[in-house]
Image (tube, rainbow, N blue to C red):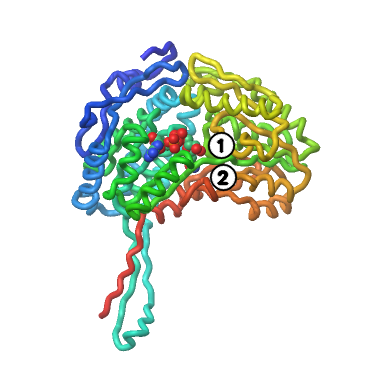
Amino acid sequence: MNTELPILPATRAFLARKLKMRIGAEWQDAASGQTMTFRNPATGEVLGEVPSAQAQDVDRAVQAARQAFDDSAWSRMRPRERQNLLWRLADLMERDAQQLAELECLNNGKSAVVAKVMDVQLAIDFLRYMAGWATKIEGSTVEPSMPLMPEGDFHAFVRREAVGVVGAIVAWNFPLLLACWKLGPALATGCTMVLKPADETPLSVLKLAELVDEAGYPTGVLNVVTGTGLNAGAALSRHPGVDKLTFTGSTEVGKLIGKAAMDNMTRVTLELGGKSPTIVMPDANLQEAAAGAAMAIFFNQGQVCCAGSRLYVHRKHFDNVVADIAGIANGMKLGNGLDPSVQMGPLISAKQQDRVTGYINLGRELGATLACGGEGFGPGYFVKPTVLVDVDQRHRLVQEEIFGPVLVAMPFDDLDEVVRLANDNPYGLGASIWSNDLAAVHRMIPRIKSGSVWVNCHSALDPALPFGGYKMSGVGREMGAAAIEHYTELKAVMMKL
Ligand code: NAD
């Protein structure tokens, strides 16, 4: 690996190893022997290779997860022990936080400093939050009426049980964090898992599998298959041995996974794309709103499902707020995320760079004006933070998810109009309102069609709050108590005494 910037010897050693998948008790190659490469987005160089799993590898992983669920010490483990193991895993991640952050930086392009305090720390916090749930999974008792058997005495109760083998498929934008959002509730409830990281970003998830091992989880509780979406992902989503599918990625692929799930009646939750509005009301603190709106779109290079990618500013402040955001964008330092002074890294791939610059060019063709940015550059897959004005609500730029550092900004005149514009989009993941007018804010919150609404902040997620989408942004919720519901089944028990 060729980098002039310092990384830990442990990170260098991890990269120098022949990386394998984790299936059952073994680190394994694909049965076919096929491999696939992954790159460092900051340089475009190949960083390493991993096995490219095919259907038969996925099948072995599902069998290992099934065996662990049905027959191992795991299935007999008490909630308190599941809690302690999750806590132990979080401790190990804390010990190796710098290495995890460096792997995330090298493989995804994001800043290592930010990865450590955001991706890794949020994953640790989330696992500890979920550890608490292991001992709080409850059923209920019911007083039955039983009109058809008036003579008997009955005792009725509802058990909440682990759903079983979970197939998890995640995107590349927060490789470790997204995996932990799925692993946490699975391990808290007693499920087992086959996890497929994104094609581009296997590194931190393979390191996570090592830590799961070190924490002392029984064999087969977590299996990791590396491979393409078309092979490994598709095989996992249509596998009849999977009891629940959980997916984070694009709406397009989410629909395929949802359909595959229904063929087997597999439980399914889908965390999909977004085109979230940032709304700056006339009374807002404009400086805070501009800084917040810039963060909402430029954090993680705009590769955030709930990024504030549509900006609506009250007409009287529109020019000023846009100028402030453009100023922030123009001042951002772009570069290799291993450099602690860098504020924006590259996009994940050449394909994503082409997609994002393609949208910017489309905007120009449709008559939009650049307030800043507008170009991609290399080596590596960089795109300058970009703001486009003179866009129309019906433009593809305003309606479609770009998934890069591109903001489209539009003025509005009153509350009803901005609510209509905010909702005029196929997605419904998040929305932020920048205002201190309590009456206006409370009038807007119930009318905004999205899974999260933030007031005077954006993308502010918490382990205890459900996260997920309305409309094309998905089905189900992650985090909070809602996640526990999605990883459990209800069993009604009626006993005649
Ligand atoms: P993607 O849908 O292309 O890929 C996501 C995962 O699905 C990858 O692991 C990929 O290998 C796999 N996959 C691809 N084709 C598949 C198939 N036919 N069958 C099964 N699996 C398949 O998405 P992406 O480009 O990696 O990620 C970006 C998308 O993810 C954006 O739309 C973004 O908004 C969304 N996302 C959503 C959330 C959320 O919580 N709502 C979080 C992060 C990202």
First in residue order: circle 1 vs circle 2:
1
Residue highlighted by disc 1: 401
- Residue 442 lies, in percent from the top left, at 68, 54
Where does the C terminus fall, quadrant-wise? bottom left
In the depicted structure, whether residue 467 falls above or below residue 118: below
- Residue 394 lies, in percent from the top left, at 66, 40
Is residue 28 visible in this depiction of the protein? no
Name the amino acid, label 1. Glu
- Residue 367 lies, in percent from the top left, at 71, 28
Residue closer to the observer: 36 or 490:
36
Residue closer to the observer: 335 or 340:
335
Q: Is mark 1 within 8 Å of ligand 1?
A: yes
The residue located at (41%, 44%) in the rendering is: 256
Dots 1, 2 in contact, CB < 8 A: yes
- Residue 299 lies, in percent from the top left, at 56, 31
Residue highlighted by disc 2: 427
Q: What is the secondary structure assignment of the residue under circle 1?
A: loop
Residue closer to the observer: 256 or 494:
256
Judged left or right of residue 426, residue 270 is: left
The residue located at (20%, 49%) in the rendering is: 73
Name the amino acid, label 2. Tyr
Q: Residues within 10 Å of mark 1 (few under 14, many from 20)?
A: many
Judged left or right of residue 32, residue 177 is: right
Q: Is mark 2 within 8 Å of ligand 1?
A: no
For the residues marked 1 and 2, what is the alpha-carbon distance in whole angstroms?
Answer: 9 Å
The residue located at (47%, 22%) in the rendering is: 350
Residue 29 lies in quadrant: top left
